Image: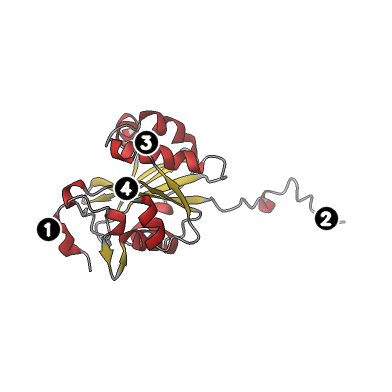
Amino acid sequence: MPTDVDRSTDPSSDRRAPAVIAGLLLAAGGGRRLGGRPKALLSHRGRPLVENAVRVLREAGCAPIHVVLGASAAEVRERADLSGCVVVDNPDWAEGMGSSLRVGLTSLAGTGADAALVSLVDQPGIGPAAVARVREAYRSPSSLVAASYDGERGHPVLFGSHRWADIAATATGDQGARVHLREHAGDVMLVECGDIAAAYDIDTPPDLARLD
């Protein structure tokens, strides 16, 4: 006579919760080569550029979203709609991207996120489709994923939570996570995004023509 299945031992009953992939937006730069215009406040489609970057992360399915501010942080908070985001300040933003990455990863500690998908505020050519493609490459808390463009590694990048401590320990100056990525090059999964995104930066006055 058939008996009820013991679902505690039935493999089909194992339904793991979806991974929590947080969006980590680095938006602290002071725009030194732009005459000291903070990149977060550059105008794009009539609004501060930081809002576009937040929208991209949100539409790609990242949650929660943490935003690291630095240059003119108070003005960014006042002028930009960052509702629904966790906004943290990096008082050492002038030291370079590494300090912002450390601040951002620290802010994610204890949130339960399985990975951080890191994007830069000054790359408006990278939209939700590319970010989602990188996000979907997550496999485990040890994942190390990067978008690539014609085979060249770029942003966004995804760091499984097991890697955060080492990345934070080696992120200095403008290096960001380059040291960790270089030392663990064999672990990096490259996800080609050149067909759906353009990875240019807004760094100099001529680049401003790329903003709408």
Q: Which numbered disc, 3 or 1, marks the residue that appears first in the sequence?
A: 3
What residue type is disc 4 on?
Answer: Ala
Residue 82: mark: none
Say which of marks 4 and 2 sits in front. 4
Residue drawn at (32%, 29%) of the image: 183
**Circle 3: element type:** helix
Using the rendered image of the protein, determine whether residue 197 is visible from the camera's viewpoint: yes
| Residue 175, picture quadrant | top left
Say which of marks 1 and 4 sits in front. 4
What residue type is disc 3 on?
Answer: Asp
Residue bearing the label numbered 1: 206
**Circle 4: element type:** loop
Distance in Å between CA atoms under marks 3 and 1: 36 Å
Q: Which numbered disc, 4 or 2, marks the residue that appears first in the sequence?
A: 2
Q: Mark 2 packing: few (<14 Cα in 10 Å), some, or many (20+)? A: few
Q: Is disc 2 in contact with disc 1, using a CB cutoff of under 8 Å?
A: no
Q: Is disc 3 in contact with disc 1, using a CB cutoff of under 8 Å?
A: no
Residue 159, image x and y in percent? 42, 42
Say which of marks 3 and 2 sits in front. 3
Residue bearing the label numbered 2: 4
| Residue 121, picture quadrant | bottom left
Residue bearing the label numbered 3: 187
Q: Looking at the image, which is closer to me, 177 or 133?
A: 177
